[in-house]
Image (spheres, helix red, strand yellow):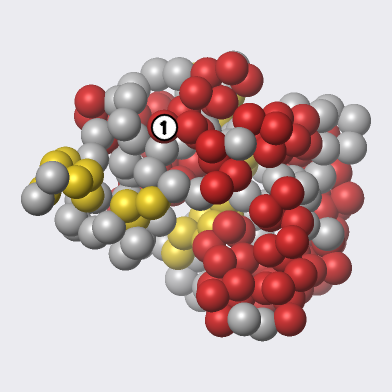
Amino acid sequence: MNILTFGPNGSGKGTQGAIIKEKYGIDHIESGAIFREHIKGGTDLGKKAKEYIDRGDLVPDEITIPMVLETLDKSKEKGWLLDGFPRSLAQAEALDKALKEADMKLDCVVEIVLDREIAKERIMGRRLCANDNNHPNHIAFEAIKPVEKDGKLVCRVCGGELSTRADDQDEDAINKRHNIYYDDNTGTMAAVNYFKNLDGIPVISVDGSLPIKEVSESIIKDLP
């Protein structure tokens, strides 16, 4: 099964992706993790991507698309859930074309719908686990609140060290990212609408303000 997920930063795409990965045994491919791997490895693409990410800007297609398509190809036998890409109408068109050329079927599109202000609050309270960025930790939500150990907060799942992304605490950077997502002319919402208008691909839209369990149940019951 190949699934494409959409939702603004802060909507819980990573959390839901981890749940679906566990249930269906598919690969959870998160574009941010691909970027971080290249950045950590000091690759040329990683260095270029970091400049844009630190500003809260969209990483250009000539950097993003080769990274993502290479990873999808590695997961085509197992199946994948793609999270965080495409982020623009142009990327949606390029992904659609690339999938068809590679004879990889897109089985479903999942859209997590969330109010912009709620999304911002969620971003500023989330914490990243050093062992797995898909381990959900958030200081404002009791169900996924980090645990305290030796006087500091650690990952509630594995006890790993927690950190915050610099751009998660920068309201200007958050607004830039959300400006891209909520743009229905050329941005991510335009990409969402592009896939909604394709024939033969079911689209599941869920209310991202609901508790995590209710969101996952809503998605799973409608997956093909």
Residue 123 visible here: yes
Residue depicted at x 34% and y 35%: 138
Q: Is residue 171 left or right of residue 55?
A: left
Residue depicted at x 82% and y 37%: 187
Residue 206 visible here: no
Residue depicted at x 41% and y 38%: 126
Rendering coords of residue 68 (x, y %): 67, 67
- The one nearer the camera, 48 or 14, is 48
- The one nearer the camera, 192 or 172, is 172
Q: Residue furthest front?
A: 151
Q: Is residue 34 left or right of residue 192?
A: left
| Residue 7: quarter of image | top right
Q: Residues within 10 Å of mark 1 (few under 14, many from 20)?
A: some
Q: Is residue 211 left or right of residue 46?
A: left
| Residue 97: quarter of image | bottom right
Query: What amino acid does circle 1 point to?
Result: Gly
Residue identified by numbered label 1: 125
Rendering coords of residue 28 (x, y %): 46, 59
Q: Is residue 22 above or below residue 148?
A: below
Q: Is residue 188 left or right of residue 125?
A: right
Q: Is residue 94 above or below residue 146?
A: below
Q: Is residue 182 above or below residue 86?
A: above
Secondary structure under the numbered disc 1 in the rendered image: helix
Rendering coords of residue 165 (x, y %): 51, 49
Rendering coords of residue 22 (x, y %): 31, 55
Q: Residue furthest left?
A: 150
